[in-house]
Image (cartoon, rainbow, N blue to C red):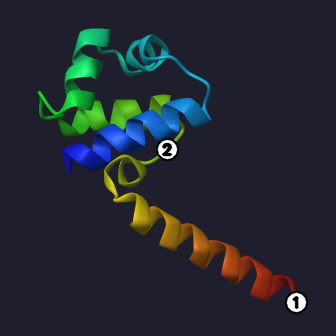
Amino acid sequence: MMNELATNLMRLRKMNSLTQQDVADAAGISRVAYRNLKKGAAQPRQKTLQALADALNASVFDLLAPLEELQNQMLSIVTTAISSAV
């Protein structure tokens, strides 16, 4: 879970053009706490995960899911949208 969290934190943060400090402030945690979560040095609580997801305009699932699973979900959404449009 930690590896996925670190990967997804960075991916979502960059997608939103935010700094680590921006995300930490929006989530109500310190930059040190954010860094510890990213490094896997701390276990996030549910409340912290939700605050991070909110700060990144994402869901908790988006934070924890392996990238491959997120890509498959996106492919399914796009495929459905294309099928509906045709």
* Quarter of the view holding residue 50: top left
Most foreground residue, 24 or 17: 17
Q: Which mark is residue 40?
A: none
User: Is there any visible trace of residue 30 in the rendered image?
Assistant: no
Q: Is residue 2 left or right of residue 10?
A: left
Q: What residue is drawn where x is 25% and y is 33%?
A: 47
Q: What residue is drawn where x is 38% and y is 31%?
A: 52
**Few, some or many residues within 10 Å of mark 2 (<14, 14–19, 20+):** some
Report the Cα–Cα distance between label 2 and label 1: 29 Å
Element under label 1? loop
Element under label 2? loop
Q: What residue is drawn where x is 12% and y is 27%?
A: 41
Q: Percent x, y for residue 19?
A: 50, 16
**Few, some or many residues within 10 Å of mark 1 (<14, 14–19, 20+):** few
Task: Say which quadrant the C terminus sits in.
Answer: bottom right
Q: Percent x, y for residue 55?
A: 47, 28
Most foreground residue, 55 or 70: 70
What is the three-letter code of the residue carrying label 2? Ala
Most foreground residue, 76 or 60: 76
Question: What residue does disc 1 label?
Answer: 86
Q: Percent x, y for residue 59?
A: 44, 48
Q: Is residue 66 left or right of residue 18?
A: left
User: Is there any visible trace of residue 73 in the rendered image?
Assistant: yes
Q: Earlier in the sequence, mark 2 or mark 1?
A: 2
What is the three-letter code of the residue carrying label 1? Val
Q: Which mark is residue 58?
A: 2
Q: What residue is drawn where x is 29% and y is 21%?
A: 34
Q: Is residue 59 left or right of residue 46?
A: right
Q: Is residue 53 left or right of residue 36?
A: right
